[in-house]
Amino acid sequence: MTQIEDNYYQTNHASVGYFVARTWNLPQTLCELILRHHEPDFLQENDASKEQ
């Protein structure tokens, strides 16, 4: 999905969402999750229950 967006728009919804989240001063961990939510390795190595 993001590769198609990157090819067409030179950006993707994950990157745009990350920058919006940063502008809204959301926690860094949430911003990173928004940015990397299509990366299976990232999602598997991070346990949300630890981030409290």
Image: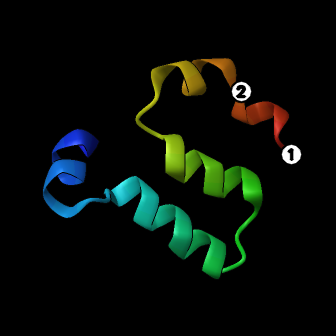
Label number found at residue 47:
2
Residue 39: percent from left, percent from top? 46, 29
Residue 17: percent from left, percent from top? 46, 65
Three-letter code for the amino acid on which mark 1 is drawn: Gln
What residue occupies the far bottom of the structure in this picture?
Answer: 24
Residue in view at x 71 percent, y 27 percent = 47
Label number found at residue 52:
1
**Towards the viewer: 3 or 21:** 3
Label number found at residue 4:
none
Q: Are marks 1 and 2 in contact (CB under 8 Å)?
A: no
Determine the secondary structure under disc 1. loop
Is the C terminus in the top left, top right, bottom left or bottom right quadrant?
top right
Mark 2, other Cα within 10 Å: few <14 / some 14–19 / many ≥20 = few
Residue in view at x 73 percent, y 50 percent = 29
Left or right side of 31 for 36: left
N-terminal-most mark, 1 or 2: 2
